[in-house]
Image: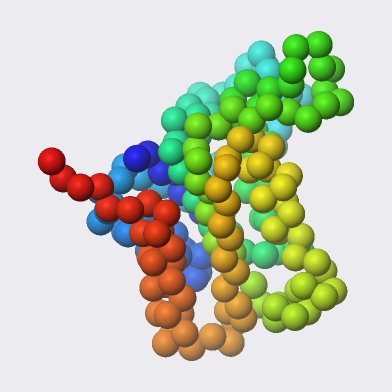
Amino acid sequence: MKISIILAHPNKGSFNHAIAYAAAEELRANCHEVNFHDLYEEKFDPILPGSEIASDGLVSEKVEEHCQEICEADGIIIVHPNWWGQPPAILKGWVDRVFRPGVAYNFLEGDEGEGIPIGLLKAKFAIVFNTSNTPEERENDIFGDPLELIWKKCIFELCGVEIFYREMFRVVVTSTQEQREIWLQKVKDTISSYFKKVQEV
């Protein structure tokens, strides 16, 4: 299977990087093809030009590469911190530019954009790993866990991805190395449960 991993954290020593690398390692151990993108390392431009908005708009070569990969992906894994209840701006811009009409969704013929889009993504599985420094009770009671709605309802379900799983690791800032090792093992176990080892012929 072809799996896309999209990482969005500017600090190379972050726990987000450790999560993404653990996921990639487990996928490769299970004989899957991995397309790994560290958006900050790649200096992905998150700004959506007006010329790209239309489905027939001209996009850059880099964006076209991302669009092609996401079309071909059997699974998508997103890794990012919770910043203000949202993904980092670079990741939001990646979604704006890559989850395009004609790539991730389309509207029915005659629909001018007011209806519910038809999802086009081939991927059947989407996994989102988040980190946070907000305790779970406060996140749920005060903020309502907006990342769950953003990724599950506003993005992946509308783009045709049938199976969604999200895991939040918290509180990272006070976590011990032992706790982080437990979390990383959970990442690997989650990956293997959704993307099982391919049996060699």
**Residue drawn at the location 63% of the way across and 21% of the way down:** 102
Q: Quadrant of the N terminus?
A: top left
Q: Nearer the viewer, residue 156 or 201?
A: 201
Q: Quadrant of the C terminus?
A: top left
Residue 100: percent from the left, percent from the top? Answer: 65, 28
Q: How is the image coloured?
A: rainbow
> Left or right: where does residue 5 sit relative to residue 171?
left
**Residue drawn at the location 60% of the way across and 77% of the way down:** 170
Q: Residue furthest top?
A: 110
* Residue 74 vertical placement versus 59 (above, below): below
* Residue 80 vertical placement versus 120 (above, below): below
Q: Nearer the viewer, residue 119 or 14?
A: 119
Examine the image and state in which quarter residue 2 appears: top left
> Left or right: where does residue 52 sit relative to residue 75?
right
Residue 72: percent from the left, percent from the top? Answer: 44, 30
Examine the image and state in which quarter residue 155 appears: top right
Residue 29: percent from the left, percent from the top? Answer: 25, 56
Can I make out residue 146 in this image? Answer: yes
Can I make out residue 13 in this image? Answer: no
* Residue 17 vertical placement versus 63 (above, below): below
> Left or right: where does residue 165 sit relative to residue 95?
left
Examine the image and state in which quarter residue 129 appears: bottom right
Residue 195: percent from the left, percent from the top? Answer: 37, 51
**Residue drawn at the location 57% of the way across and 42% of the way down:** 162
Q: Residue furthest left?
A: 201
**Residue drawn at the location 35% of the way across and 45% of the way down:** 34
User: So how many labels did they put on this image?
Assistant: 0
